[in-house]
Image: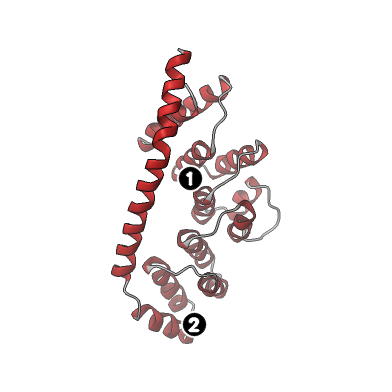
Amino acid sequence: MNVVLFTTVIHWYSRADDIDRAVEMWNQMLKVGCLPNVVTYTMLMSLLTKLKRFRQVGEIFKDMVSGGCRPNVRTYTVLIQCLASSGNLDAALLSLGREGKIDAAEHLLEKMPLNGCKPNVVNYTSLINSLIHYGRVSHALAVFKRMQDEGVMPNSITYSLMSKGLKRANMLHDLVEVEKKMATIDFWKQQRVKSEDETLVNETILKALLPELKRESQDQRQTE
């Protein structure tokens, strides 16, 4: 089996939330000397996050980086979601190799461009959610403004989180400004354009991958 086949099997076990079989397949993959790729690493990290095994997510991420595999946007999304979901921020920080009471999610967001990844609306929204959860609403508002300055438009979830956070913090002036801006945006149109873009991207990726997958399949048959 090659990395594509191992990753496919791990994917199906992950879809079934079968962590034991997913990890068993992961260990088998390493045992036969097949190196995981960014998709395999991220898939396992996502499953561990869903099952609230936050420390293990950090350990997998450290193995990934030390092994020379570069994270992608999806990897960072999973890490930020892991931190946002963790009830113990300090433990999550330590598992990612960071010390002190800093916002590891924001640190990850800042590191993304260094690895050739541009933060997207999901990354920023996860960070805003995390900051509001820990009562840092002013900081969340600063991130909300920064994402727009950097050309990333908030979606309906981002606005909803920000609005609720400002209301809870009694930051009424900022709340009025956010809700004014929110009222001018056609979220249905935004979602429709996004869906069309995603369909086009998926079709383009599939067309690009088909020749490579066909070659891998032919090579596999020749070696068997």
**What is the number of the mark on residue 171?**
2
Q: Amino acid at mark 1?
A: Thr
Q: Circle 1 is placed at which residue position? A: 49
Q: Give percent across and percent down for residue 83.
A: 54, 53
Can see residue 208?
yes
Circle nearer the N terminus (2, 1): 1
Q: Is residue 23 above or below residue 157?
A: above
Question: Colour mode?
Answer: secondary structure
Q: Is residue 138 above or below residue 91?
A: below
Can see residue 20?
no
Q: Is residue 46 above or below residue 19?
A: below
Q: Looking at the image, which is closer to me, 215 or 63?
A: 215
Quadrant of the rendered structure where residue 158 is? Answer: bottom left
Residue at horizontal 35 percent and vertical 76 percent from the top: 185
Callout 1: SS: helix
149 lies left or right of 157: right
Q: Quick one: which residue is furthest to the top in this view?
A: 224
Q: CA distance from mark 2 to mark 1?
A: 32 Å
Whether the residues at callouts 2 and 1 have beta carbons within 8 Å, the answer is: no
Quadrant of the rendered structure where residue 215 is? Answer: top left
Q: Give percent across and percent down for residue 201.
A: 39, 51
Q: Amino acid at mark 2?
A: Met
Around disc 2, counting alpha carbons within 10 Å, would you say few (fewer than 14), some (14 to 19), or many (20 or more)? some
Q: Quick one: which residue is furthest to the right in this view?
A: 99
Q: Looking at the image, which is closer to me, 184 or 134?
A: 184
Residue at horizontal 39 percent and vertical 84 percent from the top: 180
If the image is split into quadrants, where does the C terminus sit?
top left
